[in-house]
Amino acid sequence: MYLYYYCCDIKYEEEDKEEYGEKIENECNWIGRYYDREIREIRIEEHIKQCVDECFNGYTSLTKIELSPHLYKLPFKCFNNCKSLIKINIEYVTYIGDNCFSNCTRLKEIRMNKDIGYVGKCRYEIPTEVKRIGNGCFEGSQIKEITIPSNVRDIGNDCFGYCTNLTKIEIHEGIKEIPKGFMKYCGQIQRIELPQSITKINTESFKESIKLKEINIKPNTIIIEKGAFEKCPNINYE
């Protein structure tokens, strides 16, 4: 394992490994970039409180990581391109930087703090193993684009509510219902195409998505609940 740490004015670099080994002293609280990109498992000790941008970017063999409970911020591209990472517990994290988990193509499970304050901007693609997206999963986040693949069968209420930067969403066949509050207050979205599998659009699904001009629904019998498009004045059906 090759790495360096910032410890106030102390920097642990790759060439220090032979002399000092890999044990990180308790005085250290800042982690820099790792250099061993073939590493499979990492444990970040409790005394670590910060890490730098792109800290684990490109660690394609990384399958498991344990974070310090005092590491509250995951910076820009922290786990970008960690293509073997399957799950991660970030229940103590309150800030997820831009593109933090971009291109983590096998990531199936993120245990997240329910009071998380910020989720950075990027395009999210739901991994193919995911069957359900929970209530409020992306609510209030800064995502711009998202693709929901055909393996997803159920979406929780308010999943993308208050995503004020969301401009594009792709929903593939498989979903049967658009849930309550699905994209309420998404003020930038202008066009949505719903798959033929949709049979119901619940109340407040697109409430006050004020720029929504067009919603394309493939021929099907659909129940649209009252208030589904409340304060969406310019919607066309095809």
Image: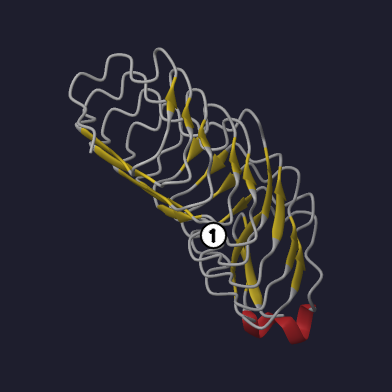
Residue situated in front as seen by the camera: 229 or 163: 229
| Relative height, residue 175 to residue 189 (above, below) | below
Horizontal arrangement in the rendering, residue 231 relative to residue 134 (left or right): left
| Relative height, residue 113 to residue 10 (above, below) | above
Q: Position of residue 170 (x, y in %)?
A: 38, 50
Q: Amino acid at mark 1?
A: Cys
Q: Residue at x 43, y 18 (%)?
A: 204
Horizontal arrangement in the rendering, residue 128 relative to residue 229 (left or right): right
Horizontal arrangement in the rendering, residue 3 relative to residue 42 (left or right): left
Q: How many marks do you count on the picture?
A: 1
Residue situated in front as seen by the camera: 136 or 120: 136
Q: Position of residue 225 (x, y in %)?
A: 44, 17
What is the quadrant of residue 20 in the picture?
A: bottom right
Q: What residue is shown with label 1?
A: 78
Horizontal arrangement in the rendering, residue 50 relative to residue 165 (left or right): right
Q: Residue at x 64, y 81 (%)?
A: 36
Q: Position of residue 224 (x, y in %)?
A: 41, 22
Q: Residue at x 77, y 83 (%)?
A: 19
Residue situated in front as seen by the camera: 68 or 218: 218
| Relative height, residue 13 to residue 49 (above, below) | below
Residue situated in front as seen by the camera: 161 or 177: 177
Q: Quadrant of the C terminus?
A: top left
SS at circle 1? loop
Q: Quadrant of the N terminus?
A: bottom right
Q: Residue at x 57, y 30 (%)?
A: 136
Q: Position of residue 185 (x, y in %)?
A: 36, 23
What is the quadrant of residue 3 in the picture?
A: bottom right
Q: How is the image coloured?
A: secondary structure
Number of residues whose C-alpha sits closer than 10 Å to that of mark 1, classed few (under 14), some (14–19) or many (20 or more): many
